[in-house]
Amino acid sequence: AKYRKIKNDPIDHITWKNCKDLKIIGETGTIISVNGNFFRPLDYTVGRAKKSYTSGLSPFNFFHCAGIEIRNIEITGNVQKTTRAPGIDEDNPSVTESNNILLRFTMCSNVVVDQMYLHHAESDGIMVSGDRIDGKWINSTNFTVTNVRSYHNGRLGMSIGGLTKGYFKNCQFKWGGFTDGSYGHNDPAGGVDIEPGEFHHNDNIKFEDCAFENNYGLHFACTAPTTSSNITLLRCSVVTGAETPKPQAITILAKNGVVDNCTIKLKNRVMKFTNPLKPGSTIKLINSLIETSGNCLTTNSTDSKDSVLISGNQFNYTKNVMTKNVMALQMKNLRFLDNKVFIPAAAIKSRPTGTHALVENAMISKGNRFYSEQTTVKPRVSYIGTKTVSDLK
């Protein structure tokens, strides 16, 4: 029932420090319920950010641990019962989040997490990060996370800020930012965010058969190609639920990023694989189903450090009215190969002038089919600047 109320409060998060070969196994029906029934007042500001000392507690704050195994526990932060002082704008709707994270790992190694249900945290369901020792950053390493559900958390289902070798299978990250009460959300209010700092690196992180769905903000984000590498989504589902002001669904800026055999339902949101301000992305989008009611994929890069392969995918436009190109691909090192792009005839007719898709300034566009359900009604594609064009008629 306790929670933090003041600066330097002696009531603090429950920290497990320097533990080795520790197993915490819940019996069937084990629930840890953290008190969330309190008000978070405005206590101080940092720049534009409004802060409160008041926060819920983290029951599992693992610090410099090795050989940790935690299984079969439900943890609720009860943020649906929390209220807070008003903030500034849509991106800062109230006092910012605290460190109420249900499952936190700081510079830990050889960790197994299985059959956990983490929900209604004030901040994140899970956080994995490294730590600085004698001026040197050291990552967390070797995580195996399976069968985890992280729902309705105020900031993120999971944040990763310093991990080498992470394997996530059959995990679900849903309804991030939708907290069920009046508390609202904290940006990025999403599913999973791989968010490295300036000096540390995230590498060899794979999500297999995972779901990123119905989040207020980004479903999956990785935004630093200079410090993120070997990021894979395999047979995952990415689904946009309720419409929100957030425009992006997936952003992967990484070296050797792969999206393979995934089902991606974007509605009016977009995917991004390049950023002119952050060059160096090498991305593959392959063998996946993408449904969209807007411009599903935008990339605009003239930097030779960026390289994108889009191959073997099925793109389906889902509306009968079209106001913008279904995709705007305009980049130097783009290979667009053997994709199918379906646009309903009614949508094509609703846009009688201009184009329906752009594959411009690319290396090659080959074996692709742009089509509708009527053989006489075909989308118009702009290939301006593309070196090799050999698409199906």
Image: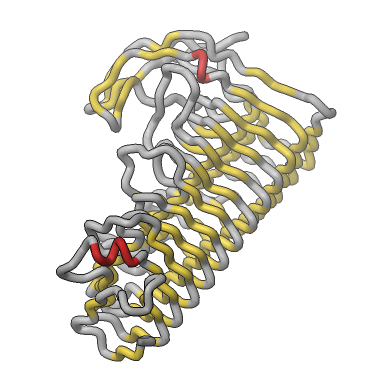
The percent position of residue 60, horizontal first and vertical second, equals 65, 29
Q: Is residue 149 above or below residue 97?
A: below
Numbered disc total: 0
Identified at 34% across, 69% down, the residue is 280
Identified at 35% across, 55% down, the residue is 319
Identified at 67% across, 41% down, the residue is 148
The percent position of residue 189, horizontal first and vertical second, equals 42, 36
Q: Is residue 339 above or below residue 392?
A: above
Front-lying residue, 63 or 31: 31
Q: Is residue 308 left or right of residue 275?
A: right
Q: Residue furthest right?
A: 27
Location of residue 366 by image quarter: bottom left
Does residue 303 show up? no
The percent position of residue 286, horizontal first and vertical second, equals 50, 72
User: Coloured how?
Assistant: secondary structure
Q: Is residue 171 left or right of residue 317?
A: right
Does residue 340 show up? yes
Quarter of the N terminus within the rendering: top right
Quarter of the C terminus within the rendering: bottom left
Q: Is residue 309 above or below residue 288?
A: below
Identified at 26% across, 58% down, the residue is 322
Front-lying residue, 162 or 115: 115
Q: Residue furthest left?
A: 353
The percent position of residue 383, horizontal first and vertical second, equals 24, 81
Q: Is residue 376 above or below residue 166?
A: below
